[in-house]
Amino acid sequence: MSVPRYWREEVPRYRLLGKVCAGCGAKFFPARPVCTECGSTEFKDHKLAEVGEVVTWTVVRNPPPGFEKYKPYVVALIELEDGMRLLSQVVDVDPEEVQKGMRVEAVFRRVKEDGKAGIIQYGYKFRPVVE
Amino acid sequence: MSVLSLHRQVSVIGAGMTRFHHRLHQDKQGRELFVEAALEAAESVDNDFAFGDADALYLGYFSSDMFERQGHTAALMADWLGMNPKPAYRVEDACASSGVAVNAGIQAIASGMCDVVIVGGVEKMRTLGTKEVTDTLALAADANYEAGVGFTFPGLYAAIASAHFSKHGSTWEQLQQIAIKNHVNGKKNPKAQYQETIKEIADKLGERKGMIFRDEMEFLNSPLNPVVASPLKLFDCCPISDGAAAVILAADDVAKKYTDTPVRVTGIGQASDTMALHDRDDLTSLRATCFAAGQAYKMAEVEARHVDVACVHDCFTIAEVVATEDLGFFAKGEGGEAASEGRTALDGEIPVNPDGGLKAKGHPVGATGAGMVYEIFNQLRGQAGEHQIADAEIGLVHNVGAAGATVTVQIYRRG
């Protein structure tokens, strides 16, 4: 990812910040410029829930450039307690133990490195909730 | 949904395709591949056809920029075909690039702007290594929130597979029947990348590794078929390929001049959906397929049960299961079982991917949609050779961009 793109996405990534439509209340993550439900362009910030559960997942064994050191890693579709969905890695877990419905919580982690001299990208990952 | 229609009828009068392959075309550029396909298409027209007869070119090429460090490829191809000053349009809709190019060409004729157009696609992928190809293909996903968190295309379809298993109880074993069937079909197709059954591949690789496999399943369960993104293994994924396909379309009234046996376009559909999987309520179905197919069936005034032969987008085995359900060949959740029962085999009730599909024929992404039209053109003219479906009259083409953000469907009928 380019440096400017990464920089622009820093706040939503670091804080799990989405938007809620001022017109109809539809929630979005990541933020969008136009509401897909009502067409409004007015939004307020929406802080996403930080706990949710795994809807579906896979274990990536052939990672793209920048993700090699994490392989094999789990990526999942996660539904948060506020109903929002996002894709994320699930860490601090044996890949074999991940299952549908597993409760997970957001953590701040290193996500990707653009080679030895490139920027180091941080952002959210999820880990199992210890009940 | 209102029923759309073509204000002028369109037919396919010729089609050509290079062999799809991972090594064979190493010394060729994309432009050479496309010209090769276009020459074959021109050759296939019954009466004389010259590229100059065409009023426009619509070219699908997903990522010439990354693969060949070459942009502006539609004008380049038109130039190489000697079509100047006819207009040329490049279409980029990921793996559906040439499916969309075909639809655009059909609409250009239906609108009255053109009488004859050349549509097609090309992808020269093997200039990059596997990891870089995977990275380039991931450009077709949401770069920030899918690829950006480590998802790959096999990963996205693996998530779809997991969701399908969980909701419908389908199994990995059922998916293997898709791969096995498509390799059986590919063996009969001289244009396919892999003209070997999985059993033959198992025997060959087994010999090299000192292993003996009783049957395909033993091989597919062995370490020689490693996991790519669970539950999908290597043989659940289509290969990386170089190749091109070209199709010549003409208005019905003009087509008569070129051939007595055109293949008529009776219905087209196209739809878009959310880029990112996190914006979809249900991962077990591609909404864009359902919408595009609904549109095409209505326009063609046919139903799924009338289709005699179909080319569907099986970039991964699970994708064929989902496609056969979304296209209405089988009820939701029953696609895997139907494949296991042989209902989509060459001699089944609805033969799917008689050419070997993306799995065995190969998947040069920009060429795939036009490559499917090439197959259906030959099927409906009874000239598909060893993998011919007897008396095929109605054929369907289904081309998917990425994880279903773009889908095109066309329905063709023997003229």
Image (cartoon, coloured by chain):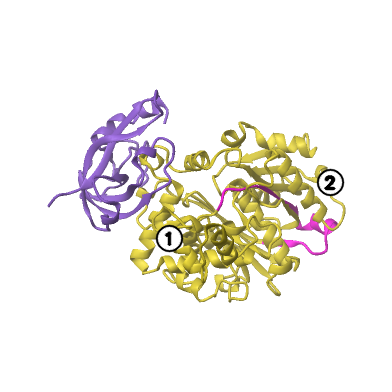
- The residue drawn where x is 32% and y is 48% is A74
Gap in Å between the C-alphas at discs 1 and 2?
43 Å
Subunit that carries the residue with mark 2: B
Q: The residue under label 2 is which amino acid type? A: Ala
Q: Position of residue B363 (x, y in %)?
A: 59, 51
Q: Is residue B241 magenta?
A: yes
- Chain represented in yellow: B
Q: Outermost residue toward the front? A: B210
Q: Is residue B195 visible?
A: yes
Q: Is residue A126 magenta?
A: no
**Residue B331: numbered disc:** none
Q: Which residues are magenta?
A: B239-265
Q: The residue under label 1 is which amino acid type? A: Ser
User: Which residue matches tag 1?
Assistant: B285
**Residue B50: numbered disc:** 2
* Number of numbered callouts drawn: 2
* Corner quadrant of residue B181: bottom right
Q: Position of residue B309 (x, y in %)?
A: 63, 68
- The residue drawn where x is 37% and y is 68% is B168
Q: Outermost residue toward the top? A: A117
Q: Colour of chain A?
A: purple
Q: Would you say B244 lies left or right of B335 here?
A: right
* Corner quadrant of residue B32: top right
